[in-house]
Image: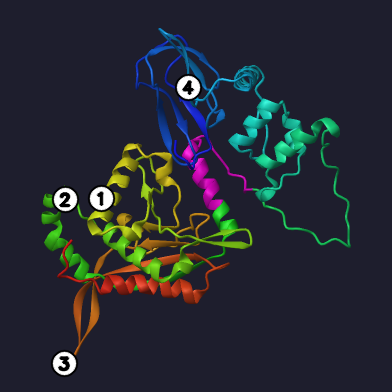
Amino acid sequence: MGESVAEATITNWLKNVGDHIAADEAVLEIATDKVDSEVPSEVTGVLSEILFQVNDVVQVGQIIAYIETEGGVVVDAPKEETTAANIQAVEQTIAVAHATASAPVDFSNSEKFYSPLVKNIAKEEGVSLAELEAMNGTGKEGRVTKSDILEYVKNRGSQPAPQAAAPAVAQPAVQAQPVAQKAAPVSVNGQDEVVEMDRMRKLISGYMVQSVQTSAHVQSFIEVDVTNIVKWRDKVKNAFEKREGEKLTFTPIFMEAVAKALKDFPGMNISVDGEYIIKKKNINLGMAAALPNGNLIVPVIKNADQLNLVGMAKAVNDLGNRAKAGKLKPDDTQGGTYTVTNVGTFGSVFGTPIINQPQVGILALGAIRKVPAVIETPEGDFIGIRQKMFLSHSYDHRVVDGALGGSFVKRVAEYLEAFDVNRDY
């Protein structure tokens, strides 16, 4: 699954107990925060036991099923020396799995949001919905976090279960704290269709709200003359595709300029962790891509500043094609330090994108348009037709001031307008 992945959610079992499985045949489908993947079998055999059900969150390294082969039973777990402790851990995992399947906690009656991980811990530890409802969460909007429920489980035996909060009594000496507003009720009539969000859309919704609540978003806009880039691409795109076997779009050209600007302004290549700023050594560019189902995913071009234009084009095309085909791996969406999104693909002139946390900036590329423009020459000014576009830069005003945010996007524009029409690719 990749070094950055610690857990995944089982979304679908493709095989049932008793089914025959061939080597490399997909057994189940899983999902991390952003990527759905199939898990293939490493052996040929019969699926003899399933330990986790759909929507269960499983940690990397946990046993999820047994496959019986002609030579015995093969456990889909990391290869390590068998010890009494390992055997005990396996038995405990199986016991927890069976308990989870036999006594599920019903969350459908709760108006509060609980993450899949918190739900899974509650099921494993036998924490009732009433206990969860009574917890004072430390997350956003009072949500119960992993640490909250683990701390509760740890201390549950030494203290009484939390009771439902008593009605608040007015305390004039204490300043009232702001509370999150509930969503306005939606009126639905018989002609309306009600469709539940899919798993990815729910995640995206949560990420967007969290980002707006976390970062102080401000924007800077700049218009760029990309006439030279358009002419150069028109001249070389056929030869480029013939030689490299790749289509040359505008995206890698823009990504190249962004990577250069990030080297000039490393203050944009950072993350925020509480009251600390993390200066990133590598420049990893996120590339927002729309999926066929309308959802959004952000694969990452690692070490983008070290790629030439050919390498950038290959990386952009590879990630874009695999995103559309649903073939991205979890690590393909991890480690981004700055994000670029192309809103011009859908005809938008510019946009105000939301920052991809924990990054501090995101650049939106607007549509390229032919517009009348003033052209300055030694003989005087005149009106001509030029190819122009807008760059929209959203950045986190907690740590990025207008001088840095504006200077960065201006530098990107300068690299694009100074594009060498005689360059090789």
Mark found first going from the N terminus, 2 or 3: 2
First-in-chain label (1 vs 4): 4
Kindly identify which residue carries mark 4: 76
293 falls in the magenta region:
no
Question: Residue sitting at 76 percent across and 44 percent down?
Answer: 136
Is the residue under label 2 in contact with that under label 4 (CB below 8 Å)?
no
Distance in Å between CA atoms under marks 4 and 3? 76 Å
Neighbours of disc 2 within 10 Å: few (<14), some (14-19), many (20+):
few
Mark positioned earlier in the residue sequence (4 or 2): 4
Report if the CB atoms under discs 3 and 1 are less than 8 Å apart: no
Q: How many marks?
A: 4
Q: Which residue is mark 3?
A: 379
Mark 3 neighbour density, 10 Å: few (under 14) some (14–19) many (20 or more): few
Where does the image place residue 229, in percent across and percent down from the top left?
Answer: 21, 67
Identify the secondary structure beneath mark 2: helix
Task: Check contact, mark 1 vs mark 2: CB within 8 A.
Answer: yes
Whichever of labels 3 and 1 marks the residue nearer the N terminus, that label is 1
State which region is magenta.
183-209
Disc 4 on helix, strand or loop? Answer: loop
> How much space separates mark 1 and mark 4, taking CA atoms?
35 Å
Horizontal side of residue 116 vs 314, given as left or right:
right
Q: Residue at x 63, y 62 (%)?
A: 275
Earlier residue among tags 4 and 3: 4
Q: Is residue 108 left or right of residue 424?
A: right
Query: Spatial distance from mark 2 to mark 3, Cα to Cα?
Result: 43 Å
Q: CA distance from mark 1 to mark 2?
A: 9 Å
- Of the pair 232 and 165, the residue shown nearer to us: 232
Amino acid residing under circle 1: Lys
**Which residue was labeled with disc 2?**
244
In this rendering, the answer to whether 400 lies above or below 176 is below
